[in-house]
Amino acid sequence: MSDQSPPPGWTPRDPDTPAGPPSARQPQQPRPPQQPQQPAGEKQARRAAKKAERKRKRTGWRRLVPTWRMVLATVVLLGLLIVGAFVAGYLLVHIPPANAAATAQSNLYLYADGSQLARDGEVNRVNVPLSQIPRTVQEAVLAAEDRDFYSERAVDPKAMVRAAWNTATGKGTQSGSTITQQYVKNYYLGQEQTIKRKVKEFFIAIKLGREKSKDYILEGYLNTSYFGRNAYGIQAAAQAYYGKDVDKLTTAEGAYLATLLNSPSAFDVVAHPQSRDRALARWNYVLDGMVKKQWLPAAERAAIRFPEPGKVRPAAGLSGQRGYLVEAVKDYIVDHKILDEKTLAEGGYRITTTIDKSRENAFVEAVDEKMVSKLDPEKRKADRVVRAGGVSIDPATGKVVAMYGGIDYTKQYVNNATRHDYQVASTFKPFVFASAVENDSHTQDGRLITPNTVYNGDNKRRVVGTRTPYAPENEGQISYGNISVNTATDLSVNAVFAQMVVDVGTAKVKKTAIDLGIPENTPNFDAGPAMALGTMQASVLDMTQAYATLADHGRHTPYTLVEKIEKGDDEVHLPDRTPRQAVSREAADTTTSMLVSVVDNGTGTAALAAGHPAAGKTGTGELDRSAWFAAYTPDLVTVVSMMGQDPDTGALESLYGALGEARIGGGGYPARIWAQYTKSALENSDPLDFDLDLQPGAAPPPPPFVPGSPEPSEEENTPQSPAPPSRPNRPGRPTPPTGGQDQGGRSQGQDQGQTTEGQTPEGDTTGGQSDAGTSTGTSTGATGGTTTGSTAGALGGVTGGLRGRPPSNYLE
């Protein structure tokens, strides 16, 4: 039974107050009037309203986070927009007629003064039906470009998005397109890398894939693709590379033509022999892909050998130097990503080069008069292998003003100025010294390396401070004893620079060479002691670039062959060539001071005939396959190289016996060509002296140049000088002059006709044996702090004269 409600007026009892009679209770205090209580439901409603109000008034970071409703609405809207755009694009974009590439124009190349240099010829194209193309050739192309062509859709959306993103963000161009997309680009659109073109390509490819068969598309692709050698289509390519119609192509030949689609000119193993390894790797990739797709039996694949393509047959309009110049300009444009190869091949471009017409003619004339006119292949078999290449750069602007690629592009199609298969020999040595100054390098015993630092120059002297056993031979196997770096540069002493490159650090020297302008991917550019002797295979153009950096006081300006490119009213953007300080002025200028001595006193005296102050370095490659002269005046840098190559096989050959000489050295014909060209190229300018800021402790600059030095006779490679230092098995040595004080070291010329021993912190090293007896000397470090023994420090008698010396297989 529930309790009864208290009667009206009854005062409720305080539960904390014990029950008892009224007399025992505490008197009740009056209480304040109470507010009327609200029902619980109304309170909950108020709380919910306040909470909703707070949500509606989102503050702080919450305002930046969209609600799920907003996200859903955005996704739906974007989806509708994408669908709408796709439908609109499909309806609005029509399959256009064939583009200009189907009837491509020629490009016009101009000299720097605007006069015409050359046209690169009309497009070579012959269309053939797919039925005429062997099945294995078709499959080779599919293996190279799109292995799932017959089973996939017309477009690859992922590849399209990736390519569009890379283009929009400036990360370079990337394809990944299907064969259908490539055909659309080749035949209906163009090679330009823009978002607009990508969008058109996408919709046209979809329409084409719905309206045309796969065979139709493949036939069109094979007839419009560019294969290099100015050949469009598989039939033109078959003729250009193998001199046969497409239906006569073998599987191996078809695989090579398919290889060319990836990089037409670069993978031409005849025109670009330095790319042969890459081309063969791609060719093997194609054949292996055919095996994976079961289009080619593995046993048949194993028996296939690489099919050597035929010689390049240049257009008659590219004879003489014009073809070399056009190809060099094309390579520059493509390599620097100004235009891709296929876009450039469409034609219609007006290309103004940096080539100075008068200097170009002067270069050709110098080579003709000093070398070509003296060749007699019928009388001297060795004259058949002689080649020459040269490049001239304005160091202040980086512009290539002249280039000599060979005797005639229609006869010798490989450009000797840009090829990368000959060693640069001793023309690399200045980079070693420049790196020493740049890095404040010291010898093994702690002496700063300057032009006056004394090194041991004995033949086959073991290099100290490296785990790699190395004891290089000097040119002529001459032992020089203790000589200064300056004299070692004059005489191109291998033993000194092999030790110096270790003292500096091979990695540091390689970095300096790269900073000067040598490409990092140069063949055989290995960071080891032998690099000091120039074992890498840089091109004449690369070496001219590096020497131009030295000539411009260490400031590197990237070279260019292109002044301007136009198509119609549009001008193509050229890459930025902002100069940068590659090495300090002190490092560059001190190196220049020693190279001035090479011309004045050493192996490069033939350059004095130019009538201008010059700094330079000679070099002779292994087995005498190449001879170099790299030199510069304050305002013009030129490198000349003679090379030996079999005209039939293309194999590199020695120059022994060429031009009636026992040997060809850089101080001979290359230096004479350099002198005549430089004299002509600078005939309208006054001789300029070098303004040099030298390293502390370096030799003082040479006296002012007096123009009008007579040209050495054709029989002279070197100036008259004192007798050379000793050769092996030659009794005794001439008494050398006394060496000088250098960085705390002391060198005393003391000839006892005996074997010299050098004592170093690394241990003892023993010099070459002489028949005369035994002699003992002390040499600290690589050169000796206090040195006693044979020295040829001041000898200038052994220079560039190479007549009568026995053939050798080492570098000078």
Image (cartoon, helix red, strand yellow):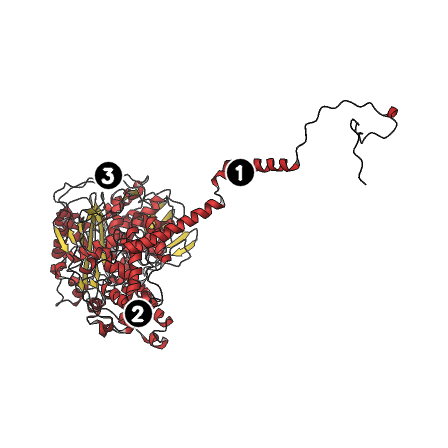
Label 1: state its secondary structure.
Answer: helix
Helix, strand or loop at label 3? It is loop
Q: Which is nearer the eye, 495 or 581?
A: 581
Residue carrying label 2: 140
| Cβ atoms under marks 3 and 2 closer than 8 Å | no
Q: Which of marks 3 and 2 is nearer the N terminus?
A: 2
Say whether marks 1 and 2 touch (CB < 8 Å).
Answer: no
Measure how far apart labels 3 and 2 are at the Cα level.
61 Å
Q: Which of marks 1 and 2 is in front?
A: 1
- In percent of width and height, residue 247 lies at 22, 74
Say which of marks 3 and 2 sits in front: 2
Q: Name the residue under label 3.
A: 691
- Disc 2 secondary structure class: helix
Spatial separation of the CA atoms under disc 1 and disc 2 = 66 Å
Q: Picture coordinates of residue 75 (x, y %)?
A: 43, 49
Q: Could you say which quadrant of the image residue 139 lies in?
A: bottom left
Q: Mark 1 points at which residue?
A: 55
User: Which x, y percent locates residue 525?
Assistant: 33, 56
Disc 3 crowd rating (10 Å Cα; few below 14, some 14-19, many 20+) is few
Specify the amino acid type for callout 3: Asp
